[in-house]
Structure formats: C-alpha cells, structure tokens
Image (cartoon, rainbow, N blue to C red):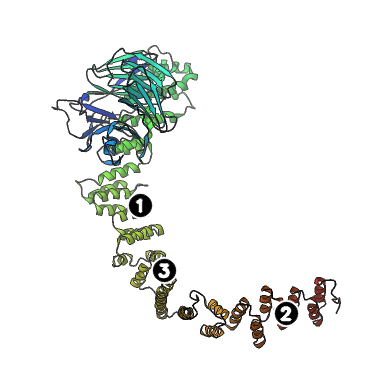
Amino acid sequence: MENPSVHWNQFDRYYYQKRLVFHMGWNEINLDHYLIESAPFGGLIALLRDDQKIINIKNIQTNKNCIFIYTCSGKLISELDYGDKQRVKAFGWTLDEKLIIVYDDCEIVVFDIFGEKIKTKCITSRDSTVHLVYKAKVWHNGAVILTKKNRLFIVENLSQPRFEEYSVPENLGIVSDLEILQPKFSLTGHTEVFISNLAKNLFIIDNDQTLEIEFEEMITNLKVSPTGRLLAYYTETGNLHVISTDFKSHFLEFQMNSKIKPKQIAWCSSDTVLLNFEKKNTLLMVAPSQSFLKYEYDEPLYLMTEEDGIRILTNSCCEFLSKVPEVVVNIFGIGSTSFSSLLYDASQSYEKESSKGDEVIRSKMDLLPKAITDCITASSWVFQRDLQKKLLNAAAIGKSYLDNFVHDIFADMCKDLRVLNEVRGWEIGMPLTYRQFEKIGIDLLIERLINRKHHYVALKICEYLRIRKDRVLVRWACEKVKSETESDEQILKSIISKLGKEENVSFASIASVAYSESKNDLAIKLLDYEKSASEQVPLLINMKNPGLALIKAIECANPDLIYLVLLYLLNTLDINENSLFQILSHKDMAINLLIKYCKHKNKDLLYRLYSQLKREPKEVGLLKITESLSDKINLEMKLKIRNESLIAFGVSKNNFLKKITEDNIKLVKLQQDYQQRLELVFIGLSINQTTAKLLELDLEKEAKKMKKTFKIPNDRYWWIKLRALAKKHRWKKMYAWAKNEKSPIGYEPFVEICIKNRVGNEALNYIPLVKDPYNQVKFYLRLNKFEQAADIAIKEKNQNLLQHVKSLAPKNLNIPSHI
C-alpha cells in the first residue's frame, strides 16, 4: 500500500488532501445548466435547471418545474415537482434533509425529499407587488427575503415559522450580493443580513439597526465562514478580503488583478477561502498568509462548504478537500519520527512476524498511550477501509502492552467507523466524515437514513449500536401501509411479524398513516395493537369512529378520554335522534359522566337522557327543581316545572321530596297573593321570612295561617314573632303577649332582645318572669340594678352570689355583706 502522504499538497504551513469520494452515477448531467444546493454534512444534492441560460435540451433532464434530488454519489432519489404557478427564487436544505423553497411571491414551502409538502408559509399583502422577491437566501432553519420594493423579511425556526421585517435603508440601491449571519453566531441573537450594492456600500442590518460601510470598490461576492466569525468578500477589481464579522479585524487581502467575477466563493472549513472561476473551471484556494493553491478542471464544478473541509462536485465525480490533521501527518508524514509513526511501522513488523516491532514499542513505553490514541484518531480521518484497519491494528497491538488503557475509546471508534463505512457506500452516498458525524450525532444520521427510505440499514445500525429502534420500525411500517401491491391483510401480517413483540412502538402512528391512505379497516386493526388508550382514542375520533373510541376509553377507565369522546359526540350528532343513545347503550361509566356534564351544561339533553335510559323519576324531579331555581324563567314557569317535579316524586313514592315540593308550591302561591294584595315583595322569601314579614306588617291572622299551613312549631313561631315585634319596637304589645300567654321559649329571650335594642326599662318587665334566680341576678347586673340583684341573692340565701353582686356594685350602695 502506498503512503497516503503522496496525495497531500503542502499549502502554507499545513498539508491538504483532495480525495475522490465518488464517481457520479448520474448520466449526461452538466452542472453549468443547473442551480445547485447541497445539504450539509455529506447531504443530498438538489439540481434546478437554470432558466437564465440557453441550453441544448438534447440528452439532458429538462422536466419543467422539477428539482432533481441526488445523493453525493449521483444516485437519483426523486424528481420533486415544485409547481407550475411560481418561480423559484432560492432553495436550500434543513439539517435533516428537508428541502426549503422560496418562491417569487414570498411563499416558503418545506418539502420532504420525495416531494410531499410539510410546511407552507407565505408573506401576504393586499398589494401583491410589494412582495415580489428580488433576492433570497436560505439557511438550514430559515430564510431571508428582499423584495423588489426593498422590504426585508426574516423567517426563522421553520418548524414553527416566525416572521420579522427589518428596516431597509433608503439608499440601498441595486444589490450585488446578500449574505446571512445566523442567529447563533450574531452578538444580538438575531439574524444579521449583509447586503452589498453597486454603489460600493455594505449594509449590516439586524432587527433594530443598520450599519453602513463605504468601500473603495464594489463588492461582488460575500461569504460567511462555517463558524460565523469570518466574512470573505470579493471586489470588482479582483481583490479577496477576509475580515471578522464584527468588522473589527482584517485578516487577508489577496490581489488577483482580474475583473473576472468568480462563480462561487466558499470556505474550506474556516481555514481557507476557495474561488470557483467558471470561465476556466479553475479552483483557487487562498490562505491567510496570501499563499494560494490552484486546481485545474476540465469540467464545471460546484463547491459545498463543510465543517471540516469542502465538497467539490463536478459532472463526473465528488471530491472532498480538507486539511490533513496533525496526528495523521505525524504518522504518515515523510521522515516523521513521532512515536505514533513508529507504532504504526512496528505493527507492520508484527504482521511480518518480526521481533523488531516489539523492541520499538518497549523502547518508549511512556509514549505509548498517546501513540495509541493518535492511531485511533487517525483512523477516524481516513476513508480507505484497509488503512483504517491498519491504524486500528496498530492501536490494538499497542494497547496489548498496557493494562490500564481505556479500551472503550478503541471499541467505540471501531463501531463508529463501521457505521460510517456503511453510509459512505455508493448506494447510500453520504460521505460523512468522523468530525461531521460527531457534530450531527447518531439520531440525525438515523433520521436521514429513514427519510431516504434506507430502513434496513437504519435498523441494523440501531441494533449494532444497541440503541432504540422503534422509530425506524414505525417509519418503515408507515411506508409499508402505503403499499399498493399488497392487500391489507398481507400488510398487517408483515407489520405485526416485525413489530408485534417490540416495546415502545406507536401503532397509533402507523394506523394514522393507514387512515390517511383511506385504509380504514387496516387502521382499526393496527389500533388493536396500540397499548396506549391516549393514542388510540383521539385517532379513532379523527377516523370518525366514536363508538369504538368510547369503548377503548371505557376499557382504560380514563374519565378525560371518555369526556373527549362524549364532547365529540355532542358536537357532531343530533341529540334529537337516537344515534347518540345507541352509542351510549349499556355504557354506564360514560352515561354517568355525561349526566354529570349535562347537569351543568345541557339540561335539555339531560331530560332526554333520563327518558331514553328510563332513569328513576326521582332524578327527573330533582333536575326539574334545580331548573326551576333559575332566574331566567318567570314565576308561572317555575310553578309549572315544580308541579312536574311533584308528579315525578309522586311516581317515585318519595314522600319527603313530595311534601317539601308541595309546601314550596303552596308558599309561592301564598307569596304571590300577598305580593299582589300588599304590593310588597314576598316571592323568594322562606317560610320563616314570610311569616316574620306578615308579623312586621301587623297581619297576625295571616301569620297564624302560615303557622297552621306549614306546621310551624310553636317555639319557632314565638321566636319569629318576638324578633318581628322587637324589629318594629312594639314593646307594649310584646309585654301584653308575654303576660297573656305562656312562653314555650322562656323569658330569657325577651330580656335579651330588649337589652340588645337598648330598652332596659322594658327588659325589667320580663326579669321577674325568668325562672332561674341566677339568670335573674345576671340580667339585673347587666342593667346595673345591683340592689334588685342583691335581693334575689338574699332571697335565695346564696352567700357566694351576694358577694359577687357586692364586688360589682358601687361602694356608695349599701349592699349587705352577709345574709
């Protein structure tokens, strides 16, 4: 095997290697005829025929309104029809390989790689001419649109698009180029837009300000580095400059002395700048030191910047240009004396069964751990599998000499390289470097494979790395149900055979796709395998199968899911028809929850429920009583409804409810009569309140009628009358009543109510009628009648009580100390 260094080019202080990745599998493709955008991280390539060029259509793909999607190996994935009403102004890729298209009317559409629309957003206006796109640029999570009326729109977060309009300076003029500084790179956290014009100005525009910089030359090309820290720009006189994106530092000025504008300006990682000159198919790489390296081609080329290098696409091949890492130079560099190089050479001696390798390794055991790590790291950079094996073999031999080396580093690299080698194959065509793989992670790689329908490869990778594979299986099953060549039974059998025993598989997701494909029976059968009712029920509702949805909700005894179905039924079914009650038949849990809901929200439906379900008349009666309490109905309707409830209570033989309902009806009728005769408000008062009001009006005859009609107990009646007389200050009438009739409540209440109303003289009339001497003394003391209190104590021969009175009495009163 030849030394890899023979393919290196020394450039500035470093080595660079341009390695062939793929021979392109497409036929008769001339890149000159297309606008090209490639997804980052070894992603897909989109070709759109350039309608600004006159071309010979013989033997080329000319499908109008199509974007051709290829892998990096030139394998056609799809022909994406973007529509025939609009012109594409810009397009680009998301990280998970969704295609973003900006149309000339400011509509932004996100497609999957097979042409299905995922998101559509449009900036609309009554004046449609305001939003004709002049220039646009797309990045992986947004777009910038400059209209012909000089309005600048920023779209961010394409999963949930957010629009913002930036102010544009009046002197913007004719734009020569437009570039984006993504939010994650800007100091403000907002998208910054760089716009150069023919008037030799550069505008830096963000959400709240615009900075204008005047240049001596017009800028024709702008390009921000992958890290967002540097900005390369090319001028009309052929000068290349590199500055910081905060415009505080100037790193490079390279004079080409040519007025030929490059087709592209691109970054190789963030280290060097490449210029693609279309006229001579020349690629010029320029370093910060102003040294340059020229690559000549005999066919058109296109540059695709990556995090750690740059992809070079031509009609016939795909290449990757990158800086050679130091660890690789240390191992394979001509004349290298690093111990990692010696370890690699020693491993070759081992293969030849020479003892020289053992001697070399043992000579510098202290340097061995780093040498092992360097060999492992170097294996991640090379693409040739045999060279990877040799480097890993060197590392394996080296670590066999150590007891405490962390073996996981070696094992993990072996696994990662096996995954990378698989996706780097021509069929998948994803030339992902190890550094790029570290950046995107295994989850995004799996997502890309799934999106490309490489389900088998994605599944095997998941199994190999021992990570969850349910996402792959579900997406495979979703594609499976779309099959038009197999019957529903065959599809179901195939899916269950592969997914039936798997954990965490969402059969609801698969069923949803089946339903969208109008395979309702298959969808329902798939849902039988769904373990989560919270996934089953909403989908069944969406499938307009509420009956089965209700059964599933009841099976899991989840009130929220049951209510979800019930509310759907109420919103979609006519409650005057029997379809609702047929669905509810024999479903007691659902019926009880619906009754609970209707008691608060829908009385009409509740009556029908009780009627259809033949519920007890008692429940109907109680419901009507509740309804009659509403302030929204008049008195006649209240009485009518309460009479209906009276009948219901009679049928149910509930004498208690029947009696209190009868009393209520009688009360309302009496109140209605009093209200009409006396022109005072009675309706709404209780029995006690009505009786009290009659007594206050001195209508004792009517009050006694109330007492008799509603069987008011005598003691309660006395309390009502006592309070009514006190309220109207009828003290003489109260005293006459107390003297002429024996009080069933005693006379203490009379004393208390007089004291409360501050008529102490009236209270003195009732104290002698109080039976308890102690209470008599207490009342006299409260009225400051100390002598009368002392007389009671002496009369009762209660020395303690007398002493208590004396202690409270004024000293000028002659209260005896002893009995």
Mark 1 or mark 2, which is nearer to you? 2
Could you tell me which residue is drawn at 48 percent across and 75 percent down? 683
Q: Nearer the viewer, residue 783 or 78?
A: 783
Tell me, yes or no, whether the two marked residues, 3 and 2, touch with CB atoms within 8 Å.
no
Of pointers 1 and 3, the one earlier in the residue sequence: 1
Q: For the residues marked 3 and 2, what is the alpha-carbon distance in whole angstroms?
A: 51 Å
Q: Residues within 10 Å of mark 2 (few under 14, many from 20)?
A: some
**Element under disc 2:** helix
- Quadrant showing the C terminus: bottom right
- Image quadrant for the N terminus? top left
Residue type at numbered disc 3: Lys
Residue occupied by mark 3: 632
Q: Is residue 664 left or right of residue 489?
A: right
- Give 328 or 390, whichever is nearer the viewer: 328
Is residue 393 visible to us here?
no
Where residue 422 appears, as percent x and y from the top left, is 31, 31
Alpha-carbon neighbours of circle 1 within 10 Å: few (<14), some, or many (≥20)? some
Image coordinates for residue 606, horizontal then vertical, percent: 37, 68
Q: Is residue 785 left or right of residue 749?
A: right
| Extreme residue in the left direction | 58
User: Which mark is nearer the camera, 1 or 3?
Assistant: 3
Residue tagged 1: 535
Upstream in sequence: badge 3 or badge 2: 3
Residue 179 position, x and y percent, is: 34, 27
**Would residue 519 be visible to someone looking at this image?**
yes
Q: In the drawing, does residue 148 fall left or right of residue 231?
A: left
Query: Of 374 and 394, which appears nearest the observer?
Result: 374
Q: Which residue is mark 2?
A: 764
Label 1–label 3 contact, CB within 8 A: no
